[in-house]
Image: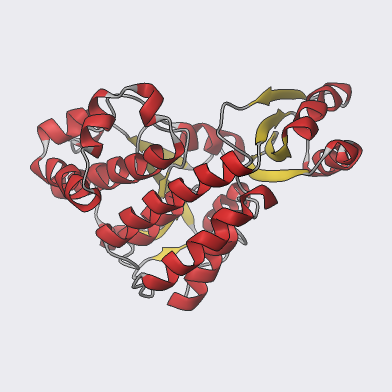
Amino acid sequence: MTASAAIFPGQGAQLVGMGRDVAAAYPVAAETFAQADATLGFPLSKLCFEGPAERLDATDIQQPAIFTTSVALFRAACATGRLATDALAALGGLSLGEYTALHIADALSFEDALRLVYRRGQLMQQAAEQNSGGMVSLLGLDEGQVLALCERVRDQGRVRPANFNCPGQIVISGDKAACAAAVAVAEELGGRAIPLKVAGAFHSELMRPAAEGLRPVLAACTFRSPKIRVIANVDAAYHDEPAAIRESLYRQVVNPVRWQACVARLIADGCTDFWEVGPNRHLTGMMRKIDRSVRMTNVSTAADVRPASA
């Protein structure tokens, strides 16, 4: 029997205009953006719909913006019958997307989740300004080669894997000098290195101030056990009771995102029908490299929200 899972994107998925068409076409999506504006006290919807890109790309804005757009798309797809929460066997999300998954699973309210990701983005931006760092996407190298690469450039500073996205794509994160040195070493090893345009060294020890700042915010939020299984980035295990969810989200800030392992676990547990819900198609691209046999459906525009028969 085919089981379905919905997965949600993280930072980097944003683009000016996201959510505008679905908000114009579906009242429940428009209400979601209005709810976000009221919760945060500023027009997040306008930044999503109109930009400017420089502000939308900022860490503190893109996190609540991607979260809100993903929820709006999901709610609209449920309203049309394209998706149904009771038909989903599991949920997952890449980094920020894990918060979206937890909200959809009713582990926390929309308002709490939105405030959390907004504060998370602020804290990560502040940590990036305190500890200058960077990230590099390494293509064509396996985990062993990447770990060896990080060891070779250790004299230049701290650097380690931050995202295990899919076969042949691992992102490293750390001090700028170490990241720069890693580019040359990657080419020596037969790989390709792409420095990423990000504010800082996410999912590394340079984010420790952000993790510590987030801990009391997590403690103040009301969490519930998920009604749908949600897989955790840090260990590819399923979230359980509230205290463990808080600890996992705290650890996520400074630990690698094991996205490939998360998807592999979902597939091993019977999920062969995946829905990527949110702006862009980044997770769909990764899935093609993880397992091309699964069925992927992307829901990122108003056209995608309409039922297939419509």
Does the image show residue 253?
no
Q: Quadrant of residue 80?
A: top left
Counting from the top left corner in percent of width and height, residue 308 is at 22, 35
Counting from the top left corner in percent of width and height, residue 100 is at 37, 53
Q: How is the image coloured?
A: secondary structure
Asked if residue 89 is positioned above or below residue 25 in the image, the reply reads: below
Counting from the top left corner in percent of width and height, residue 14 is at 39, 31
User: Between 308 and 236, which is closer to the camera in this rendering?
Assistant: 236
Does the image show residue 135?
yes
- As drawn, the residue found furthest toward the front would be 130
State left or right for residue 208 relative to residue 70.
right
Asked if residue 52 is positioned above or below residue 207 in the image, the reply reads: above
Residue positioned 13% across, 40% down in the render: 30
State left or right for residue 31 relative to residue 103.
left
Image quarter in which the C terminus is found: top left
User: Between 304 and 143, which is closer to the camera in this rendering?
Assistant: 143
Residue positioned 43% across, 76% down in the render: 242
Counting from the top left corner in percent of width and height, residue 215 is at 50, 66
User: Between 201 and 172, which is closer to the camera in this rendering?
Assistant: 201
Residue positioned 83% across, 22% down in the render: 184
Image quarter in which the N terminus is found: bottom left
Residue positioned 19% across, 42% down in the render: 33
User: Between 82 and 8, which is closer to the camera in this rendering?
Assistant: 8
The image shows a total of numbered marks equal to 0
